[in-house]
Amino acid sequence: MYGKAFAPEYQGALTTLSVNSSLTEVLAEGLERLREAERAGHPAEVARCGLAVAEAHRRLGSTAEADRAWKASYRAARTAGDTGAMAWALWSGGTLARQRGAFPLAWRLLGLAAELGERGGDVVVRGYSLAGLAETGRIQGDYAAVGRLHEQLLAEARRRGEARHTVWALEGIAQMHRNTGDFDRAYALFEEAAEIAERADDRRGHAWALRGLADILSARDGDTGRALELLSRAEETCRTMNLSSALAYNHKMRGNVLYRAGRYEEARDLYGLALSEFRTMDEPRGEALSRLGLAKSLARLGRDPEETAAELAELALVLERSGLRHAREMVARAQAEFVPEAEGAR
């Protein structure tokens, strides 16, 4: 049995904030409480409020501000000798590093956060940090290395009845099954995640689950209408909560659905929108995936094959350097489809 979802990253004076609070509300409240704690000379409270500020900035796509905020939170926590707060700040920094495509830094910071969480007896930050490590490996396409960790974290979350963490783990495992071609298993896991998130009032988790379901309805069943309907529902949540990154991924997925349906002009426009959004928030993985979708759409609409070949070759190099294996495989498939002579020369 799962209780209501909660946001453990909203700490100190900010524990009254909901998991579904608008990020602009979180940022405004967090900054106000942070200034109060600074004036009062309470470094532990500065660290806790600074964490919420860092996370709000990160999720709103303000990566430079998020970087400054998590570092300030860590310094305040260290001054206060608060091991748990130090772990949470490192978790935030590691999550930001992953979002920005700095995977070695993400591994280092999240690993340190997990160690500090265990040392300080904070089981929640330890779990979130291990989850961050698992997600980093999954995003890089290293499923063999992190699949077992996802399953372990899912079991722990189920045992503690933590709805939000259970939803996260289910969605991660579902995505790995989807990417390796087991659409039926992926759909069942996304469906379970959506049900748990809805009952627990975890709107963010529910929006991500709807996106996953839409993807499979499109790719497996060719059900474009239903897929677009689910994405519209998810988009409403993203806009209400100001979830910039999730909204950009929603637009990218809408582009995928339209592309599969042969609606290339509409897909081109959605990929272009998502590309602009990802560039604004400095999120290289989303940017690369949007560039790929845009290149494929333009190729279908008659773009010069040499331009398509050059675009895909550049994208392949970018992904090779960044270590995004699954995305690199997607580019290779696009090269085989649109630039077969390049594939033959590889």
Image (cartoon, rainbow, N blue to C red):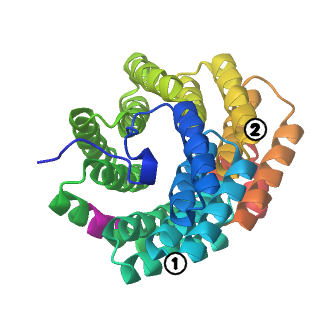
Observer able to see residue 130: yes
List the single residue furthest toward the left.
1
Q: Position of residue 135 (x, y in %)?
A: 47, 61
Between the residue at mark 2 and the residue at mark 1, the CA separation in whole angstroms equals: 36 Å
Q: Position of residue 40 (x, y in %)?
A: 58, 56
Q: Position of residue 11 (x, y in %)?
A: 43, 53
Range covered by the magenta-colored residues: 150-154
User: 74 and 137: which one is in front?
Assistant: 74
Magenta-highlighted stretch: main secondary structure? helix
In the picture, measured across the screen, residue 249 lies left or right of residue 221, that is right
- Quadrant position of residue 121: bottom left
User: 221 and 23: which one is in front?
Assistant: 23
Amino acid bearing label 1: Gly
In the picture, measured across the screen, residue 197 lies left or right of residue 137, that is left
Query: Tag on residue 280?
Result: 2
Residue 169 vertical placement versus 81 (above, below)? above
User: 172 and 67: which one is in front?
Assistant: 67
Pointer 2 or 1: first along the chain = 1
Residue position marked by numbered label 1 in the rendering: 81
Amino acid bearing label 2: Thr
Q: Is residue 151 magenta?
A: yes
* Discs 2, 1 touching: Cβ within 8 Å: no
In the picture, measured across the screen, residue 129 lies left or right of residue 323, that is left
Helix, strand or loop at label 2? It is helix
Residue at (79% x, 54% y) in the render? 342
Disc 1 packing (10 Å; few <14; some 14–19; many ≥20): few
On the rendered image, what quadrant is the C terminus found in? Answer: bottom right
User: 14 and 225: which one is in front?
Assistant: 14
Residue 188 vertical placement versus 332 (above, below)? above
Helix, strand or loop at label 1? It is loop
Q: Is residue 239 magenta?
A: no
Disc 2 packing (10 Å; few <14; some 14–19; many ≥20): some
